[in-house]
Amino acid sequence: MDDTIPKLRKLLKGEIRTDLAARQAVSRDASVYELVPEVVISPADSVDIEKLVKYVAKNKTAYPKLSITPRSAGTCMSGGSIGTSIVLDMTTHFGNIGSLKGTILNTQPGVYMRDIDPLLTSNHLHLGCVPASRAINTIGGMVGNNSGGERSLQYGNTERWVRELKVVFGDGNEYVVKPLSRKQLAQKLKETTYEADLYRRTYELIENNYDLVKNARPHVNKNSMGYNLWSVWDRDTGIFDMTRLISGSQGTLGIITDVTIEAVPKAPHSGLLLVYLPSIKNLGDIIATVMHHEPATFEGFDNITFNLGLRYFNTFRKQLGTKEWLRQQSILLKSVAKFKGHIPSMFLMIEFDGQTQGEVLDKISILHDDLKSFNLKMDIEADEASSAPFWRIRRAALSLLQNQVHGRYASPFIDDMAVPPRYLPEFVPQLRKVIRKYKLPATIQGHFGDGNFHVIPLMDISRAKDQAKLEPVMRELIPIVLKYGGTMAGEHNDGMVRGPWLPAVFGQDMYEIFKETKEIFDPQYIFNPHKKTDASWEYSMSHIRSQNDNGLVKK
Ligand SMILES: Cc1cc2nc3c(=O)[nH]c(=O)nc-3n(C[C@H](O)[C@H](O)[C@H](O)COP(=O)(O)OP(=O)(O)OC[C@H]3O[C@@H](n4cnc5c(N)ncnc54)[C@H](O)[C@@H]3O)c2cc1C
């Protein structure tokens, strides 16, 4: 690397930092891993990225360890945004919002969602796929991970809303990637360019394995495991959409430099039914009952999260302003008083949308009546103002867990399983059995309407005893999830934690197709090594973070 840095300084306009502080600042994301890079580069523009990719491709043989890991806000929970060679910081110079035309938003990938939200809200819009980390993540990271969130129940994950991307591929050139019609595809396949070759080989790979690829799609509303090949080519519609493949590829196929994404209209009214469960014994049946009512969102969090929310509610004061913070805190304290010392085991948040307040209340009261047979305490929060503190806790749930709890820390590795909700009455008891067997003090929260569970054990991940639990727990849970057609990652992607399990989840034949996809786009393995198909359990386990504190880099 020694002579590389001076050469890169001559080549690029953006900042190049090799000091330890800069490298350590990007050595973690919100996963259990840590990789310290050799250099952090903040490209000034797409031309810098093109030059860098060309440089790395040319020098890869002489310096086999050279690679590029794109990183946006670094909130990835699977170890996707860390690397040992070049970390490409996309937040410094790729932070401009382009335009909003109707519902179509064009933006650079390093823009924080918190900066996009006000623009969308003022136009009565929102992104259907926005994650709970919306206060700290970026749009490029959402595309990179194929993120989802509370609205994914209606709108699915990010891949469904991406309309066009600009991507720097392995030849070091930036290309526009957008859906092609059958005719446009045929035209593209006739060309003799590098780009056409990517299209031809991807098309042939899918077409030659059409049934295998289509059948490999997990039977859930949201998935971010593997490469989304099943969504790229459809013989019936004749649409070939490579944006689907780049979405969720975690920077392993190329670097995204521009994002065009569709937003959705925000319903004028919404209201919440809060349901308090004394235990999670009947959780599966309750979720199945709620799902018959087709709510707009259906989320949940456990008592550990609620207690953390109460304890750290003061941290929201700056964001909310004192007046609003006091108002929300008083709603929460009233709830606590009602529990008379018996904090529920699980809080369910079931939201309905409508054109009028009356329509929303009607929907809520029909569900309320239906749930009476479970003998549960419930509250109706008829408008957004009264439900706000619960949303705040739910959206901050994973951040709250980044705080130390009894000397242990959030250790995400089984953090994102999803199964079709109709199987939850069978699935939840089996999940609980594994959690008990391995004595995992796990917190549970998630997007229950999607059957998407964030099970986050609180562990001392630096101890060998706790580390030894990871592999057997994965081995026990994967067959249970697969039995119901589910996925180990609804939205948090593979990275270093689930990449090694791709053959176990998709089977060896499909894994080979994923690997071939990687090699079509990145035969030299210059993009984000040790993630997805290039991951190995040994490598990942040998890079578990050493210091036992939370992994999230504070922004
Ligand atoms: C508190 C908390 C709550 C969360 N809640 C959710 C949730 O509800 N739903 C959800 O889906 N996720 C959630 N996450 C995970 C994470 O926040 C999301 O995946 C988020 O969208 C990642 O955005 P980021 O900007 O931090 O991306 P990063 O972590 O920087 O990157 C994510 C991946 O995308 C790749 N990437 C980044 N930029 C580019 C680029 N320009 N080109 C190519 N590849 C790129 C990276 O290499 C990496 O593999 C949560 C995380 C935390 C810590």
Image: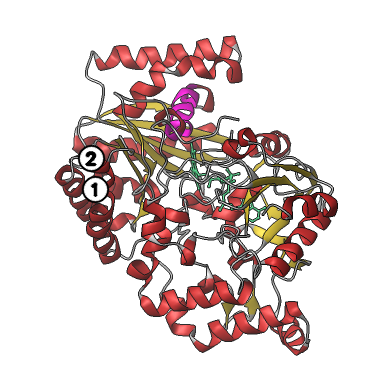
Quarter holding residue 283: top left
Q: Quadrant of the N terminus?
A: bottom right
Q: Is residue 478 left or right of residue 159?
A: left
- The residue depicted at 36 percent of the width and 37 percent of the height is 300
Q: Is residue 378 magenta?
A: no
Structural crowding at the residue carrying mark 2, measured as other residues with C-alpha within 10 Å and reported as few (<14), some (14–19) or many (≥20):
some
Q: Is residue 469 left or right of residue 133?
A: left
Q: Which residues are magenta?
A: 386-398
Q: Nearer the viewer, mark 1 or mark 2?
A: 1
- The residue depicted at 34 percent of the width and 61 percent of the height is 486
> Could you say which disc has been placed on residue 440 in the image?
2
Q: Quadrant of the C terminus?
A: top right
Counting residues from the start of the chain, the first of labels 1 and 2 encountered is 2
Q: Nearer the viewer, residue 303 or 196?
A: 196
- Seen as rendered, the residue at the extreme front is 2
Q: Is residue 289 left or right of residue 282?
A: right
Q: How far across and how far down the image is residue 143, in percent?
A: 61, 54
Q: Nearer the viewer, residue 11 or 446?
A: 11
Q: How far across and how far down the image is residue 274, in percent?
A: 36, 30
Q: Amino acid at mark 1?
A: Lys
Q: Nearer the viewer, residue 5 or 107?
A: 5
Q: Which residue is under mark 1?
A: 469
Q: Is residue 10 left or right of residue 458?
A: right
Q: Amino acid at mark 2?
A: Leu
